[in-house]
Amino acid sequence: MTDASGATAMSKSISDTKGRQRLASADQRRLGFYLTLPTQILVLFIAVFPLLMQLYISMTDWTPLSGLNWTRAYELWAGFANYRDLFDDDRFFGALWRTFLIIIIAVPIEFLLGLAIAMLFMEEFPAKKVFYSALLVPMMIVPAVAGYMFFLLFQSDGPINQLLSLFTGSKVAISWLSDPDLALAVVIMADIWQWTPLMFLILLAGLLGVPNDQLKAATLLGASPWQRFVTIVLPKIKTIMIIAVAIRTIELFKIFDTLYIMTAGGPGVATETISVFIYKITTLELVWGYVAALALLILVTLSIVAALGMYLLQRNKSRASA
Amino acid sequence: MSEIRLEKLTKRFGDFTAIEKMDLQVRNGEFLALLGPSGCGKSTTMNIIAGMESPSEGTVYFGDRDVTRVPMGKRGVGFVFQNYAIFTHMTVRQNLEYGLRMHGLPAAQRKRKVDEIAGFLELSPLLDKPTAGLSVNILQRIAIGRSAVLEPAIFLLDEPLSNVDAAFRSVMRYELKQLQRRFRQTMVYVTHDQLEAMTMADRIAVMDQGVLQQVGTPLEVYNNPANIFVANFIGSPGMNLLKGALTSRDGRPAIAFEELDQTIELPDELARLAEKRNSAAVLYGFRPEEIELTSQNGLSMKADFLERIGARTILHLEASGREVKAVFDNNVAVQLDSMVSFRPASGSERLFDAQTGARIG
């Protein structure tokens, strides 16, 4: 009890001194404010203006075809009609669902595969460096090029089918990219191929941070490799795991370039994700008010997801230090 | 069962030989200190006993059991790391009960054992605290408790006191000794600090450059060092060594120091042993603590420098570039830059072969 009151008294006296300092330098602070004002305005302009513009457009039926400058979009005022329409748009929910599906299939596979490879790389084996470099190549490839590679690989007379023919001994001619289910599978495969290395890299960094002595100590105390993983490794890399999964989830939510080159969202809308959907209605249907509403909704959703992630991280951290 | 025996143990890292054909026996219930300067191979020896490294050649026995190929998790040795390797994401209790949990002990028994060891190590009030932010002294006790709670028959400690402040070190020395008395484990203790080795160990194994130099009780190692390395390494300051040649003076055996242009009488016994060995060139050794100031039949050197370190004074003597250190009580009456006559206390002289460094007598 005495401790606690002592601490408050101390923090109070500290804040008092700070208060005096603040008073003494009030003029200086004002000067600082004026000096940074141009930059502040610029930053505000860059960050806030597009948001406000988007909000404004989203409340109208404005399109570039309407012949009006965007500033006069209020003449086509629609209120919340665009938002209402969104909730009735099956194509939107379809795209949302497919994006979701890609995430919940690809991210766990990338995570587990990345973790397994990272654990493998904690051991010594021949030509480790060669494998290490080779493993990082997919990540370095421009996504559009990766998309094109998979587009060529999975043609009905492409190398994949040729390989399958060779193994099965009969002619295989699966039309990968024009079958709705298979197309989605190929899209997921391409993503796994390209982004497992990132998972691997992040998780390897995490594993390398686990103190070797603690692992040895655990072994000497009788822990099996599995017990070691659960009791030592996992708690120590949990934060990094959350970060890795969060990065890939957010990235996958925006999946576009590889996918668009491979399937352009097709066949039909079979691989149409949120990004592809937005791209199409922006460039083909030109309903910009609607697009603005949609984009804003996604921004808000992603922000909530990110905030949730941050909250989990924070809780994790404070629990670790508590 | 808990005797440790190393046979022809050799460990090479590439071209570097860390341990060379080492034979060592640690008796059941013994406290053995592995002592040596940095890089002498003592930690490697310890790691091989623990199973963290495997030897290039040779065998490790626990009792009659060859454990050379037994993985470290199955050897059942307690190990305290130099940096303690505390599980920083766990509380003190979770650390202490880790081994018990891994061995699948029920919660009630775990609690009883942890409470008992925590009581012994005075950790009880801290049991539910997180380990992050605890002082080194506490971490050290957790590290010991975490291994001790499993009651291993063999306990290995890798310089556990090197990070502890001086005041706490003597407390820990006492506690470690108590711990061993209580659990009667075979303890191997790696250290480069001879004070720790001398005060705690039943026997000391001195190593240098991967070679075991001598094994013996602290007093044996101090009084009868096997070679000039041990003579120099043990004791603070180490043994004085002067290069000399056997000669005789007035019909009595003596040793002549050419550099000093002085001669000193040699006990018959030492002279006889030296003659038997046929070693003409010898090193004459004597402890700084066993020097008498005398005007007769002694050596004469200039008082160069006095180090007063509280309980005692170290006198640096010099002649013709040769240095001799002498340790006295604080009230020694010596004038700096004056000539000082002295001789080793009778019976404290040692002779070493100048070529091999081995003790003659």
Image (cartoon, coloured by chain):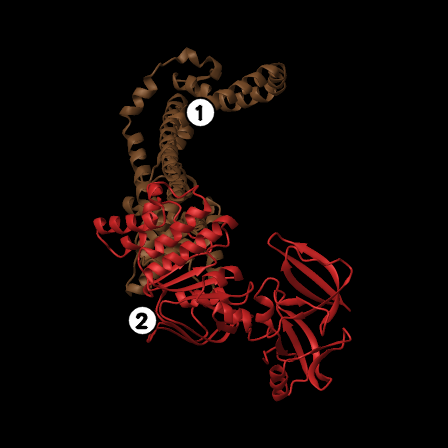
CA distance separating discs 1 and 2: 57 Å
Q: Chain of mark 2?
A: B
What residue is disc 1 on?
A: A6
Label at residue B260: none
Give me the residue at 66% from left, 67% from top. B292
Three-letter amino acid code of the residue under disc 1: Gly
Q: Chain of mark 1?
A: A
Residue A6 rendering spot, x and y as whole percentages:
44, 24
Which quadrant of the figure has residue A25?
A: top right
What residue is disc 2 on?
A: B1
Q: What is the display colour for chain A?
A: brown
The N terminus of chain B: image quadrant: bottom left
Secondary element type, mark 1: helix
In-image side of B344 versus B203 (left or right): right
Residue A234 rendering spot, x and y as whole percentages:
35, 48
Can residue A119 be seen from the camera position used here?
no
The correct choice, above or below, for A275 with respect to B38 in the image is above
Which quadrant of the figure has residue B131?
A: top left
Badge 2, how many Cα within 10 Å: few under 14, some, many 20+?
Answer: some
CB under 8 Å between discs 1 and 2: no
Q: Which chain is red?
A: B
Image label count: 2
The correct choice, above or below, for A64 with respect to A193 in the image is above
Can residue B41 be seen from the camera position used here?
yes
Three-letter amino acid code of the residue under disc 2: Met
